Amino acid sequence: MGSGRGRRMSARFSTLLPTREDLREMRRNPRRDLLAGLTVAVVALPLALGFGVSSGLGAEAGLATAVVAGALAAVFGGSNLQVSGPTGAMTVVLVPIVAEHGPAGVLTVGLLAGFLLVALAVLRAGRYMAYVPAPVVEGFTLGIACVIGLQQLPNALGVAKPDGDRVLVVAWRAAGEFARHPNWTALAFAASVAAVMLVGARWRPGIPFSLVAVAGATAVAQLAHLDAARPIGDLPAGLPAPSLAFLDPGALGSLLAPAVAVAALAALESLLSASVADGMTVGQRHDPDRELFGQGLANIAAPLFGGVPATGAIARTAVNVRTGAGSRLAALTHAVILAAIVFAAAPLVSRIPLAALAGVLLATAIRMVEVGSLKAMAEATRSDALILVLTAAATLALDLVYAVIIGLAVAGALALRAVARQARLDQVPLDRGDHSAEEHALLAEHIVAYRLDGPLFFAAAHRFLLELTEVADVRVVILRMSRVTTMDATGALVLKDAVDKLDRRGILVLASGIRPGQRQVLQSVGALERARDHATTPEAIRAARAHLEHTGVLPAGPAPDSDPREEPAR
């Protein structure tokens, strides 16, 4: 048995490893992927530096994450287009960890989160991402595009980034600072780069206009000596040597909860980013379990080089897709180029105007918005439109985690409402059986039959209670339950309450067609103590007649013989 379990585990791990198909994909159009990787590297460099500083571990930590995690996630991840590295959403989670546990605590949390992500991959937890509704993904994409665009306003307007945690507040303050002290040079650089990218993409999609625009803006800034075009600035040289010196075994217990939060965010953001990348292309589909595995390995390795926890980065992934990437070679190239920049080309890259990079991201944000998809989703149903708008607004006003939680909660509530509306309680005529017309009419005068269709659970049960307790003045109620699709404890308790109220009115309740699983639920709450259970509706009708005869409502007489061909009621 142990060897069999070992073989299954080995086979499971083999499905998470790179395949020959990955290598074939990388060979199909290497020139296009190399150009896309170069473009993404240029965009990722200032983001890696900025997120490293924001996390509290310094610019070196951001670069280490972009290089080490970016390379490993590209090779082992489940998406051909995903670009990984430090992100703003992760930075927000890391800041309080740094404050409480210091830099060593953040590195330990990243290492633990990596192992948790690998465990999730082995347990095939990635497949549950398929249950995220399309309006949530579309709303998230729209919201994150707005966030990316607003985040670029300080650099695009040439002002220092104002204080504030919310992107709307920071953007508003940046606009106010620009109004007081306008920097038209920076604005011109940002607008020109964005315009070149947007127009060029329509004119010649195969040309990397983002790279052309950034190079042109840098050349103009240097030749014209434009002080208003603030450059990136000095870069750290090299990466730290790998080390486990930060690890403190005694602190592992206190760091487990933050590690779980980091792993959850890394999984959620990476899988959402991969889903968005799939939606921006035709024919690309990521493997969610492999993506978790790749992110897990990336987060195990990054702390060894002083890097912060990493996730799939939606902005860089969008740049990667929009600049023509077709395989994981582009993301791998991005990591290799960043490593080369760190060691060899730091002085050159340090001259790139921040406004030019802001223009790249502004154009990327605009191109992320698929107007056709949004229109189709908004016109599908009012529920889909509501979910889309709420998710986008929450992404913009709150953050990614809250946005997805809100979107899923609203989608779940609306789905429950839709399912609950499918449940029906219909009065149906009595089966004639072997009764004569006169007998059948006499029975129908004192017996009423209802058929329950659909789910009988907490979201729909109380409506049944109202309908059942308002039944006319009859002597027997037959509940035909063979079409009840599902039942929970709430539904069983509500049914029990209805039966009790009918019993107090002197009305006998008989049930037919109860499925075994539902009978167990009914018995557990005592719902069948007063409602007599019968296999078929004809049996219930015979029991109802016997009850009416016993109480003197009907004259006593021989009950009709049962027909062996009788089938359970539907």
Image: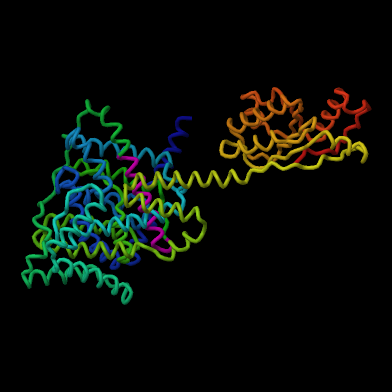
Q: Main secondary structure of the magenta part?
A: helix
Q: Is residue 49 above or below residue 281?
A: above
Q: Position of residue 154 (x, y in %)?
A: 18, 58
> Where on the picture, by quarter, is residue 320?
bottom left
Residue 267 among those drawn in magenta: yes
Is residue 17 among what the camera can see? Answer: no
**Drawn side of residue 251 relative to residue 525, left or right:** left
Q: Please state which of residues 308 and 329 is positioned toward the viewer in this rendering.
A: 308
Q: Most extreme residue toward the bottom, as rendered?
A: 203
- Across the whole image, how many numbered discs are drawn on residues? 0
Is residue 242 among what the camera can see? Answer: yes
Question: Residue visible at 38% across and 62% down?
Answer: 280
**Drawn side of residue 344 relative to residue 491, left or right:** left
Q: Position of residue 386 (x, y in %)?
A: 45, 53
Q: Please state which of residues 529 and 122 is positioned toward the viewer in this rendering.
A: 529
Question: Residue visible at 59% across and 36% down?
Answer: 457
Q: Could you tell me which quadrant the C terminus lies in?
A: top right
**Drawn side of residue 103 relative to residue 418, left or right:** left
Please give the range of residues in magenta: 262-283
Q: Please state which of residues 107 and 529 is positioned toward the viewer in this rendering.
A: 529
**Drawn side of residue 315 relative to residue 287, left or right:** left
> Where on the picture, by quarter, is residue 254?
top left
Q: Please state which of residues 295 and 453 is positioned toward the viewer in this rendering.
A: 453
Residue 180 among those drawn in magenta: no
Q: Position of residue 323 (x, y in %)?
A: 30, 66
